[in-house]
Image: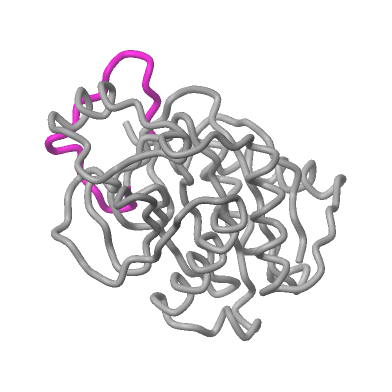
């Protein structure tokens, strides 16, 4: 498994990077994992989601994901993207089976860091704000949803990206969605963990599933070149 160097990028470039990871995973013949951050608070909309009931305050960027699902406010979090080639055994799994494996892997990483993380087995009513409700196999700590993800598939790979929330800006969420945050929360409400420690624990947990991790420092530059040419595809408004 290849793990890319963590970087901080604009919303459009982050989505373009996630999009091209699928073709790179197929080209290299192995799963690729990357962790990243955002240059500014960014609202990502699901591929087919409308802006109805959503207000965009000044200073908030908006992008459209290549995946479906509901809106996510990316702010104080560690975001991940996993691309698995379709010919890989895990790449052949159904949407829910793949989703379950990814979240069980993240849950183990959180358990290793001392969080009482659980994987949900229920399905709640949909809401424009992804973190306001809990869906099957999503992760909660202390009854609050702290991880949310979405998935898309191409002929090359299965790609799942998601947010591991560190701290939730409740006032900003209420301003955007016009409602309270419901069952959403962040890890730092329960225990402070450094981003480096979180990333290291996640890498260790994914290594148990996909095999020994290797880091290709030069690879990120090549992927970035390709992603820059596609970032306009993910402009939302």
Residue closer to the observer: 2 or 200: 200
Q: In this view, does 209 lie above or below 189?
A: below
Q: Is residue 213 left or right of residue 126?
A: right
Residue closer to the observer: 5 or 120: 120
Classified by dominant secondary structure, the portion drawn in magenta counts as: loop
Quadrant location of the C terminus in the rendered image: top left
Q: In this view, does 199 lie to the left or right of 90?
A: right
Q: Is residue 10 left or right of residue 4?
A: left
Residue closer to the observer: 6 or 61: 6
Residue 137 locus on image (x, y percent): 37, 68
Q: Is residue 3 left or right of residue 145?
A: right
Residue at (24%, 49%) from the top-left corner?
49
Residue at (64%, 55%) from the top-left corner?
202
Assess whether residue 56 is covered by the magenta stretch. yes
| Tally of marks | 0
Q: In this view, does 62 lie above or below 184?
A: above
The colour scheme applied to this rendered structure is one colour
Residue 15 locus on image (x, y percent): 51, 44
Assess whether residue 183 is covered by the magenta stretch. no
Residue 42 locus on image (x, y percent): 41, 30
Residue 41 locus on image (x, y percent): 43, 25
Q: Is residue 28 above or below residue 62?
A: below
Quadrant location of the N terminus in the rendered image: bottom right
Residue at (51%, 73%) from the top-left corner?
101
Residues in magenta, as a range: 46-62
Residue closer to the observer: 125 or 161: 125
Residue at (82%, 50%) from the top-left corner?
219
């Amino acid at each position: 498994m290849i793990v890319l160097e963590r970087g901080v990028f604009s919303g459009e470039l982050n989505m373009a990077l996630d999009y091209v990871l699928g073709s790179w995973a197929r080209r290299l013949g192995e799963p690729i994992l990357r962790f990243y951050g955002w240059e500014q608070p960014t609202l990502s909309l699901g591929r087919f989601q409308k802006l109805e009931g959503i207000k965009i305050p000044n200073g908030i960027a908006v992008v459209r994901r290549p995946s479906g699902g509901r809106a996510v406010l990316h702010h104080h979090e560690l975001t991940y993207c996993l691309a698995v080639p379709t010919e890989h055994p895990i790449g052949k799994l159904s949407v829910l089976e793949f989703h379950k494996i990814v979240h069980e892997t993240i849950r183990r990483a959180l358990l290793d860091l001392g969080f009482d993380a659980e994987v949900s087995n229920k399905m709640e009513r949909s809401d424009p704000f992804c973190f306001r409700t809990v869906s099957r196999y999503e992760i909660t700590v202390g009854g609050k949803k702290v991880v949310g993800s979405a998935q898309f598939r191409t002929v090359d790979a299965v790609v799942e990206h998601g947010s591991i929330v560190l701290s939730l800006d409740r006032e900003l969420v209420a301003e955007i969605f016009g409602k309270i945050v419901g069952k959403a929360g962040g890890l730092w409400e329960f225990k402070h963990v450094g981003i480096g420690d979180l990333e290291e624990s996640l890498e260790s947990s994914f290594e148990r599933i996909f095999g020994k991790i290797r880091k290709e420092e030069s690879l990120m530059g090549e992927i970035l070149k390709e992603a820059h040419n596609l970032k306009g595809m993910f402009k939302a408004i």
